[in-house]
Image (cartoon, helix red, strand yellow):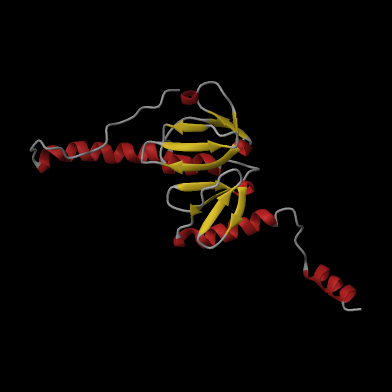
Amino acid sequence: MRTKYFKRFAITTELVSIEELRPIAEMQARMSELVRYSPIQYLTDGYSFSMEELGDIEIPFSDITWGEGVNAEHSFLHMKDGRILALPFGTHGLESLLGDSKKTRFTQISRYVFLSIPSIEKISKKIVYIKGYDVPLKVSPNYYHPLVYDVYKYLTAEIPQWRVKDYVQWKNENSK
């Protein structure tokens, strides 16, 4: 399936009346809603994805180290092997794509940057280091608490949840 791209609404150096711009702006607003929720067609089973625009290759989510939205129409995926894949959609599409991953968890650290949590090597309140990259990535203050929550959920995913009865039993065993 082909994805259709629409010219973005813009004001140029040519003089036009506001009323001439109204139908263009209205059409763009309707199209932006469609594009936001379905920016591009891709196939995923939750463990890997493929899209026609990237060719006939299948890309495992586990091979993605981090992703960055460049603007409304472009984003990049940084792979573990050093490759960088250019994607034909922006941050909203990238968020939607990475959100489909079942096994590999992704978290957002700024408006435009998404990290694979297993790829994090070091973390602090302000920066994150990724395995294999010497450059720190800055954590925006608005994304710090969701980052901590996502890392906690990732680290404790395999731990079975205790019931009150389990806690009482553990406490009794360790108090002796």
User: Residue 149: x, y in percent?
Assistant: 59, 60
> Where does the image place residue 81, in percent across and percent down from the top left?
60, 33
Location of residue 40 by image quarter: top left
Quarter of the picture containing the N terminus is top left
Q: Position of residue 58 (x, y in %)?
A: 59, 27
With 170 as the anchor, is 103 left or right in this view?
left
Q: Nearer the viewer, residue 31 or 72?
A: 72
- Residue 35 at what x, y percent from top left? 38, 37
* Residue extending furthest toward the right: 176
Residue 168 appears left or right of 144: right
Closer-to-camera residue (78/2):
78
Above or below: residue 3 compared with residue 96: above
Residue situated furthest top in the rendering = 56
Q: Which residue is outermost to the bottom?
A: 176
Q: Quadrant of the C terminus?
A: bottom right
At x 55%, y 57%, the residue is 147
Q: Quadrant of residue 9?
A: top left
